[in-house]
Image (cartoon, grey):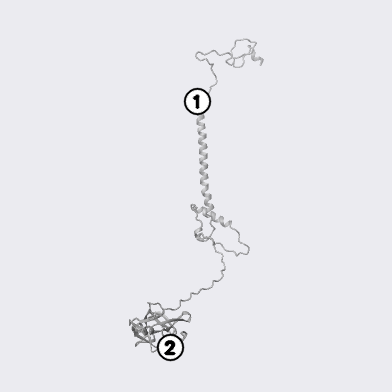
Amino acid sequence: MPDDNTRNGLRVGGWIPPYSTGGDTTVPIRPTAQPALSGNPRPRDHFARVSRAGTARPRLVLVAALCLACAATAAVAVIIDAARKPATQTAAEFTFPQANGPLELTPAADQNSDDVPVSVQPSPSATSLSATSHQAVATSTPPKAGAQPTTPGSAATTTKAPQPTRTTAAPPAAFTVGSTAGLVAADRSGDRVRHYDFRGRLARIGSTSTDRERADTNFRVRAGLAGDGCVSFESVNFPGYYLRHYNFEIRLSRMERTQLFREDATFCPVTIRDGAALALRSTNYPTHHIVADGDRLKIVATTADKALAIKPGPAL
């Protein structure tokens, strides 16, 4: 402005230093040069400066703070990721269908029990099991057309073809060599072979029978004295006495060291009635079998089916 260059008028508040009042009035007013200061060659700076040593420490602090913030952020991200992974795996592995009662892992029909995979993941909490169970029920496949509806918790009923009944056939009657047995009449209930007055007889033996009568019915089964895979019957209460045929009658005789006695005291069991009973055939009279004539026993020429049917029984 032209008025600012004149000396006649002053600005409000006077001149602003460092302007001086002397000088030429025809030229613009300029700042007055500052005199040189003793001991300091550089002129004085009116604006405060930040020294280099003063700014180095704040910068280092700022960089360190940024590094710590980055490290803390990375650590939080790792912890969150690690916390999420087990929950996802547990929910994926432990998904059970909803059922009333204990849960059972049943192998498939074409899979052995040894091939069933076993999970080694930690057991899920009760909350996760409940959630996955309801989810499994909600996402289960719908039943096929024509299938019978089933109520929750009830197993589907399947109609199976009736299996044929298997009957276990009784083993055929047989004498065991070395055992003590009784000779029970198959066609005369309660009757057994016994010796009485050294003769073979059929007698009714029951609860009212005496101990002597019971003992007369017990015989030890020996291997046939004449061989040929047959058997001989030795009296239990008269050891050394055997049943034999003599004049075609069955008698109890003391053992003799003759071939005739051995043959007379040897009988071959013949299976009859589909193995339910046995007939006793004479060894030295192959066409003769033991039959009952009243209560006495003898051998006659007849077939095995018409002979006395005998079943091995327990000793009394």
Q: Position of residue 7 (x, y in %)?
A: 63, 11
Specify whether residue 208 is in view: no
Q: Is residue 299 left or right of residue 10?
A: left
Three-letter code for the amino acid on which mark 2 is drawn:
Val
Q: Quadrant of residue 254?
A: bottom left
Q: At 52% across and 45% down in the image, what residue appears?
A: 81
Instruction: Determine the residue located farthest toward the right in the rendered image.
Output: 2
Q: Whole-Å distance between the Cαs marked 1 and 2?
A: 143 Å
Tag 2 residue: 300
Quarter of the image with the N terminus in it = top right
Residue 54 circle label: 1
Closest to the observer, 192 or 56: 192
Q: Position of residue 39 (x, y in %)?
A: 49, 14
Q: Quadrant of residue 251?
A: bottom left
Secondary-structure class at tag 1:
helix
User: Which is closer to the viewer, label 1 or label 2?
Assistant: 2
Q: Position of residue 217 (x, y in %)?
A: 37, 83
Q: At 50% across and 27% down in the image, what residue appears?
A: 56
Q: Position of residue 205 (x, y in %)?
A: 38, 84
Mark 2, other Cα within 10 Å: few <14 / some 14–19 / many ≥20 = some
